[in-house]
Each structure stands twice: as C-alpha cells, then as structure tokens.
Amino acid sequence: MGIKVAKFGGSSVADAIQINKIKNIIAEDDDIKYVVVSAPGKRFSEDTKVTDLLYLCRTHIEHKLAYEQIFQVICDRYLSMESSLGVDVGMKEELEQIRKNINAETPVDYIASRGEYLNAKLIAAYLGFEFVDAAKVVKFNDKGKFMEERTNEELEKVLSGCDKAVIPGFYGSRIDGSIKTFSRGGSDITGALVARAVKADVYENWTDVSGFLVADPRIVDNPKPISRISYRELRELAYMGASVLHEDAIYPAKVANIPINIRNTNRPQDPGTMITSKPAKLEDGQIISGIAGSKDFTSITVYNSHMIGQKGFIRKMAGILEDHDVTIEHIPSGIETVSVVLNNKIVEGKMEEILEEFDRQLKPEALDVVTDMALIATVGAGMAMRKGTSAKLFTALANADVNIRMIDQGSSEMNIIVGVANKDFEKAIRAIYKAFIG
C-alpha cells in the first residue's frame, strides 16, 4: 500500500465516457488518493479543446466581436457532462458567473483557467472526492513568478486534511488572489507538485498513449515501447525534439525522487513507461533507450590556422550570437576549426549580419555555412563505457548511404548526436533503430 497521485490529461477527461473510464481506473486502485485534471480536450479529430474555445472568447472580446455563440458551445458541453454523469454541481450557476466575469473583461488567465476549474468540480462530485481549488494552494508572487516552496507548504497543509481530493491543473493564484496560469505543461506541473507535497510513492500521468517509444512511429514502423527510462535520458530525448513531458513538468517529482508512470486511459492494462532517477538495466543486450531528432539547423564553421593560440576566440563567437539573441545548440571543434550549430528558426533574417560580424571580429581564413542539417540523438545510459557503440552507429549510417556532417558526444557518454542532411533524416533514424533494436 502507498500513495499515488494520478493526473488525467485533456483526452482522458474529454467527455462523460472518458470520465467514467477514470472512475473505473480509480476503483481498481485504492492507492490513488489525489487526482489532478485538465480541461476537456478533443473528443474527435475535428473537435476543439475547451481551453481553446475560452481563448477564442477572449480574442472576440478584445476585437469587440460577439462571443456568446462560442461560450454557449462551452456551456452545452459542460451541462451535457453534468447530466450524463448524474451529478449536480450547480454548473448552470457556475457558467453564468463566468459569463459575467468575461463581460467584465477579467484578465485572460482567469478565462483560460475555467476549463480545469469546472472539470475538476464535475469529476470530484462524480468520484465522491473533495474538490480543492488550485487557486488556494498553487502560489505565484505579485510579478507572476511561481513560488515553489510556498506552494509545497500550502499543498501539504491543505491535502493533509483530505483523504481523497481532485485538484484542477494549469493554474494557481497570485498573492492578491488573482488567477495566474502556468505558461506550458500546466496540468502536468500541478500533478508533479501534488505528488511532491503528499510524498507520493508514484505519480501516474494518464494520457492517450501507452508510454514512450524508442523512436517516432511516423518514421519507424511499430517501434519498441520504452518500459523504463531515467530522468536524464528523458531530458536528452526531450531536448532533441521527442514528444515527452516538459522539463518543468518533471522537476517537482524529480527533486523528490518520485517515479513517474506514463499510462494510457484507454488501455489501463498496459504498464506504460516508468521514469525513475536511475537508468534501467535494459533487456536482451539493448544499450540504447531512445532515438530522437529534429530538422532544419544551420552549421557555421570558422577556419583559422592560428586559432589554437588565440585567447577568447570562442567567447567572441558566443558574444556575437548573444548580441543577435541566438542560442547555440552545439559547438563541435578541431585544432583549426570551430563550428556552431544553430536552429534555423532562431537565425532567420539574422544570418547575413552574423556572418558579417564573424568576418569582422574573428578574421577567419574561411567560413563554411550549411543550412539544411538535421540533428539526431541516440540516447542510453547503457552506452557509457560500452566498446563499439560509436562504430556500430557510424557503420549503420554508412551502410544506409547517409553522410555524417557533424558528430558530438556528451562527456557522460549517454548520447551521441550526429548531423545529417535534412533529406537523410528519416533514413538515418531507421538505420540507427535497425542497428540497435532490430
């Protein structure tokens, strides 16, 4: 026996049918004591998320357009859910109050947060759990900065008096009581905060997929699921573009050393992916945990035969990029060369000025620019100190007729990043997957 915190995402709480699945999941597991919910997501591909409808109401108000028809869609959806679930939370009165507040042009954070607020009230009533408004326990200062320790204290104090509770995700409140939302991954962050506060044994994050996969299923057919992965490995994959939890959503559970289990609401029998502080011992000789990557990077290589004797050379390069508000992804280097790898979206419209400054301040013998590069990271704690890993990867790419433009291996030996042409991106990932997974 232990304590579990379960967070259910938008697709898991999209309608009464999905909410009934949640009730069945909780009925099967007495350890689930605290539940965090998102606003209703899409019920089908052409549907619109409730939060998006709320933002749309706000946009109409700002442009002095009628928003009542959009708001009525929201009302109909919640009233239907209340009726289908057979509960009475005074939804009609709640919606009317929100309508009045919208008319009063309440700040956008309040409007955006109402999807979670209303859904949590519904689900709490349906489960027979206590409703705890996130505005009372998730705190931001008057400048909108999240107050981590204050929040942990408030959550501990309030939830210690609740045997079972439902908390809306995504938002909290400033000291003055006004609503403030998280910028991204909001409900996931709330879930991790609750898990930390109640010292949960496991934080379950329920969504519409059965955990993470070794590679993107749009590129690799039927990729192997990841049963267990460490926080560090996950961060490497997320940085390279894998669709995983955002760092902010992991942090509260990570610092408290609470395992995170990614589960599928539509397939609760699937074990999902467990995220832990320590890497798992991979099965069947497998040495990598995942493969991820992104397209559209630019590499600028500076050639200078006297570079090794020049002090502050890399600092000058970094300073030029900082002046143009450009972040560096990687810095591969040699005796007479230094390259910087940059995201094309960030350098768009700035490249000509950057190259002019490189030429003026660094006085290179030559500059080489490659603008159509993709980066691929092969990640796994099992790679460390393992002989032949790099050779296996490079041989796989050579056999697939993929030219490697850049190589960068982290000092932890947990990942190897290669740069390839955009056109070879998918072919390279398939080749790496075949070599390491089969």
Image (cartoon, rainbow, N blue to C red):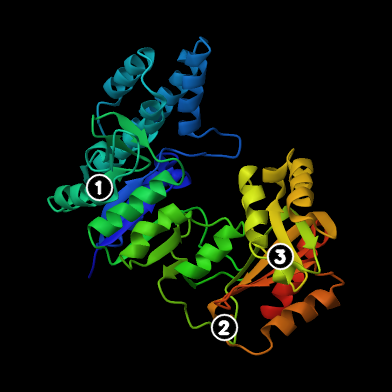
Q: Quadrant of the N terminus?
A: bottom left
Q: Quadrant of the C terminus?
A: bottom right
> What residue is shown with label 2?
384
- Residue name at image x 28 percent, y 44 percent: 167
- Residue name at image x 30 percent, y 21 percent: 92
Comes first in the chain, label 2 or label 3? 3
From the viewer's perspective, is the residue at label 1 or at label 3 nearer? 1
Question: What x and y, as percent, mark residue 210?
Answer: 51, 61
Q: Is residue 379 or residue 359 the one in the foreground? A: 359
Question: What x and y, as percent, mark residue 63?
Answer: 53, 13
Question: How far apart are the two marked residues, 1 and 2, measured between alpha carbons?
Answer: 38 Å
- Residue name at image x 47 percent, y 23 percent: 73
Q: Secondary structure at mark 2?
A: loop
Q: Is residue 17 above or below residue 368?
A: above
Question: What x and y, as percent, mark residue 42?
Answer: 52, 39
Question: How far apart are the two marked residues, 2 and 3, measured between alpha carbons?
Answer: 25 Å
Q: Amino acid at mark 3?
A: Val
> What residue is shown with label 1?
151
Q: Secondary structure at mark 1?
A: helix
> What residue is shown with label 3?
220
- Residue name at image x 67 percent, y 55 percent: 317
Q: Is residue 381 or residue 407 the one in the foreground? A: 407
Q: Amino acid at mark 1?
A: Thr
Comes first in the chain, label 1 or label 3? 1
Q: Is residue 253 above or below residue 51?
A: below
Q: Secondary structure at mark 3?
A: loop
